[in-house]
Image: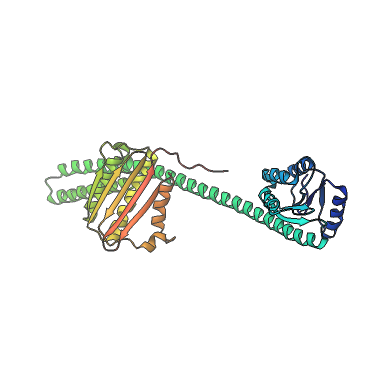
Amino acid sequence: MDASPHAILVVDDDAANRLALEETLRPMGVRTMMAASGEEALRRVLDNDFAAILMDVRMPGIDGFTTASMIRERNRSRNTPIIFMTSAIEDLGSMFKGYRAGAVDWLVKPIVPEVLRSKLAVFVGLHDMNQMLSAELAERTLTEQRLRASEENLRALAAHLQSVREEERTHIAREIHDELGQALTGLKFDIGALAKGCAADPDVAERTKNLGLAIDRIINSVRRICSGLRPEVLDEIGLSAAFEWQAREFSRRTGIRCNVEIEPGFDDPDRERSTAIFRIFQELLTNVARHANATRVRVRLSDGEVIRLSVEDNGRGIDPHLLENPRSLGLMGLRERALAFGGSIQFEAVEGQGTTAHVAVPNRISQPVFHA
């Protein structure tokens, strides 16, 4: 069983000295434990924690220097203050030998009670402080571990929600395409047949023609909505083809030239990474269209152990303060998409010269998991 935090170990082969020290220490309210030899002292420190150790230098068997050195090698007591007691310090060599063995102070016999109590009061106080700091450090470490686990859980949950969201978008896109798209196509054929039967009536022919054109516009809208929800090219042909398709669509809608450079032999990653990287690419292009005032975008995509994407524009350059602003939810979402796979996203910006986004996502690392 451990000694109390204020326990003092007295190591002396002279029983009278041990008794005198015990009486001297009693008014301090500390508990004393006795050891008549170096061997017994070593056994004591195995099972007890002491605020300080009073060690006689000259003892039969293992002397005080050797005992102190061996105590210092034990993890539990390596920081316990050791005060050597001696009849006289014969020379400076003995004093230095004691300090090398782990002594923090010396007492010359006969020991003056007031001197002993004042020295021990300091070391008992330091022991209490060390105990308190150790407890605070342990609590802080535990808190940091809990916060880290909580952060990883939240990140895993966000990744899971993104995956569920993508699945739902895919499902909705297919439903719209299959149900509404087919119905509109069938309706167009019916109107075409009706127009042929009413070709003699110019007014009906004009109306059916306008209806056909309206249906064409609705069909195009359905296709655009489906592509926005989940581009078929991403699932059917792959990430590189989806990048080129998205660049063409971006240029067509915004008038901003978008050049895509894909490393020869690019091998598409798994479906989850492909989706995350494609969504990051889409969001970066959206930011260019909304904020950059750019006329040109250059995109590079390469693979390997790490999938790397860079999107460079020649616009006004992103405000550095926005990169650190916790309210920049769009940038936060980009980072979280990359972090979900152990990746990162960095921005380089020069005012008036444009912004470059660098995305790096490890190619074959599993998604984060929930912690208990």
Q: Quadrant of the N terminus?
A: top right
Q: Give the quarter of the figure containing the C terminus.
A: top right
In the image, residue 316 lies at what x, y percent? 28, 62
* Coloring scheme used: rainbow
> Can residue 250 be seen in this snapshot?
yes
Residue 262: image quadrant is: top left
Q: How many marks?
A: 0
Between 260 and 130, the one nearer to me in the picture? 130
**Residue 283 screen position, x and y as percent:** 34, 52
Residue 175 visible in the shown view: no
Instruction: Name the foreground residue: 20 vs 85.
Output: 85
Rendered location of residue 149, percent (x, y): 54, 47
Identified at 41% across, 53% down, the residue is: 333
State whether residue 179 is above or below residue 288: above
Q: Residue at x 63, y 51 (%)?
A: 138
Q: Is residue 98 left or right of residue 4?
A: left
Q: Position of residue 194 (x, y in %)?
A: 19, 43
Which of the two residues, 354 or 330, is positioned nearer the viewer here?
A: 354
Which residue appears farthest toward the front when viewing the image? 91
Quadrant of res 290: bottom left
Q: Nearer the viewer, residue 54 or 218?
A: 54
Answer with left or right where residue 16 lies relative to residue 334.
right
